Amino acid sequence: MNLRYKLFTAFLGLIIIPLFILGMIMFFVTYNSIEKKYSQQSEYSLKAISYSISSVFKDMDNVTDNGIATSVFHMALSADDPFTQDLTDAEQLSLNASQRNFRSLLYNHPSISYAFLYNFNGKGSSEIVSIFNKENFRTLPYDKFKGSELYQEVMKLNGVPKWIAPHEYPELTGTEAVFTQIRLVKELSFFQNIGILVVQIKNWEFESIFRNLKIGDSDQKVSFMLVNDDGMILFDPDRKLDGQDFHSFTAKNFTFQKGFQSFRTEFDGEKSILSVYHLKDYPWSLVSITSWDSLSREVTVFARWFVVVIFLCLLGAVIFNLFFMNRITGGIAVIVRFMRRVEDGDLTTRVEEKGSDEMTLLARGFNDLMDKINSLFNRVHVEQHRKNQAEMRVLQAQIKPHFLFNTLESINVLAVQNEGRKVSEMVYRLASILRISIQDRDEITLDEEVTHLRNYLDIQKFRFEDIFDYEIDIPQELLGCGVLKLTLQPLVENSIQHGFEGIEYKGMVSVKGWEERGNLILQIKDNGIGMSSAQLSMFQYMVSESGEAAESITGNKPEHGIHLERRGLGVRSVADRIRIEYGDRYGIFICASPGEGTIIQCVIPKYGQGEDHYAKGIIG
């Protein structure tokens, strides 16, 4: 993975993803916190509604208590004509003081819808005594009421008021959404049961209680209702769900129990929070239903903005990666690419310097470093060149005395033999050889090198006329190629001195040249005594004269003077010079076996004299 993707992955892993996880945690914590706090608010609100409803019921209880205490209901039950007890139709003057006071109390309490009495001592039509008449309402006959469970429950309460919610006993209270109070009426002197009072109140006060109550913000969608313990919806201010089963609207199965409970579920197909509070002293529960969408609207908006912010951060990361990070990683990649070019040997490469940031400083530092490296390389190249020149002068100095000594020895022999003409020719050829040798040039043409070789061979022929012959076969087009001077002569000298030593037949030296794969191949072949593998191992390049190499290869100490001579001073000198001048790709290769002669093949690059050949470029 390159640096660009590493930085982008780090940006995602260390910023975007943690921010997203933190936002999700905050989102869920906020959701739970909203539900918890709203449940607390709902509990307070439902308790307030419960208190208001209980106050309405207690107020009506006080009204009926007053009627019992003033014997208004007792007088109505014991009257000779029960049809004249309706306080709404009676004239004020025909009423006694207690009836007038109670009637004033009733008129001052406008929530009463109707009221009547069941007379235990009455018969027929006198069993029902109307106190407050109501149009289009037919009272349940006493005989049917007496056979109901409600009657038994009222008798057990023994005068304590019993409240009935709408839709619980429609045959008694009718189909209107009204609350009804039923209580036993006693005769105060003997506490004898004389009748049952039924009072129905209007829903004005209940509607005003629910209408004026809000939980939280006014934008929240909240509805209230009153539900009995069996799950019947008794009172819905919106008049939509009256008399229906509450459990049919919600998927959560729960029971209406004492105290407060709140949970989140679906109600009528919409996610909502249900809060339930059971009223004290009454078998009913107040329920608030709040739409979760309206409640969590702010959190949802916050979540949407959070997603937008995350998206913008991600987009910013991508833009940052495409433009700014690409500027950094791209600049680094360019420098790395140029460094690889330097690894491949291109020391002239330079990075373009543009801008004024740290990448520009890095590019400038790279260029300065390459300038210093080039300067050091130039110094090393100059010093190496001087070292090579010094080494080649030493090698040439090794060749010149060696050859001169052998030639002078031959001339001396001819002079002793009184061969003046031959001495003259040999001195002439020696002068030509020395003229080339003492020239301040390391490189000559192959034509000059062949001429030098012919002079040397002719000198040797004067000395060893019957020992060997020679032939030179080099194409004319190769004679203009450049070679190091004294390349062929030491190799031929090695064949003559060591290859033909002790032979009983006439030796033959063959010198050939040809071009192969852009290289100049010079081959010296003789039919001499050849060499063994141990002797071949003596021909090593660039080693000292101490004979340590021979010891390391053969495992034996060489005999003094013999092995050093057999190793071939001239051959090794030529090989070292070629390696120094052209590099390790070029040099001398020897193939020999005992009694089969020796082949020395010299491989050098083909180039014209004075040309800056490819091998020199590689060494540089």
Image (cartoon, rainbow, N blue to C red):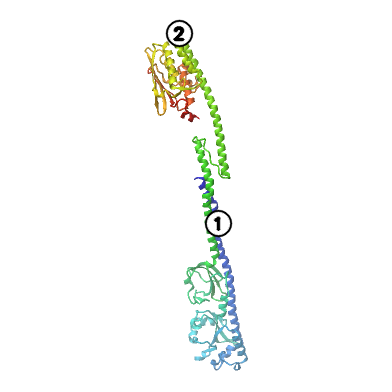
Residue 593, numbered circle: none
Tell me where residue 157 appears, x and y as whole percent.
55, 81
Q: Is residue 175 left or right of residue 63?
A: left
Q: Gap in Å between the C-alphas at discs 2 and 1?
A: 108 Å
Please say whether residue 19 is visible from this viewpoint: yes
Within 10 Å of the Cα at label 1, are there few (<14), some (14-19), or many (20+) other Cα atoms? few
Q: Nearer the viewer, residue 509 or 280?
A: 509
Amino acid at the residue labelled 1? Leu
Q: Is residue 525 left or right of residue 187?
A: left
Q: Nearer the viewer, residue 334 or 163?
A: 334
Tell me where residue 359 appears, x and y as whole percent.
56, 44
The secondary element bearing badge 2 is classed as: helix
Q: Earlier in the sequence, mark 2 or mark 1?
A: 1
The secondary element bearing badge 1 is classed as: helix
Q: Nearer the viewer, residue 351 or 490?
A: 351
Q: Which residue is mark 1?
A: 22
Q: Which residue is mark 2?
A: 413
Please name which of the two marks, 2 or 1, marks the residue nearer to the observer: 2
Tell me where residue 449 appears, x and y as whole percent.
44, 20
Q: Nearer the viewer, residue 616 or 13?
A: 616
Q: Taking 64 as reference, is 567 above or below it?
A: above
Amino acid at the residue labelled 2? Val
Q: Residue furthest left?
A: 505
State yes or no: discs 2 and 1 in contact (Cβ < 8 Å): no
Tell me where residue 305 appears, x and y as whole percent.
54, 60
Q: Taking 495 as reference, is 194 above or below it?
A: below
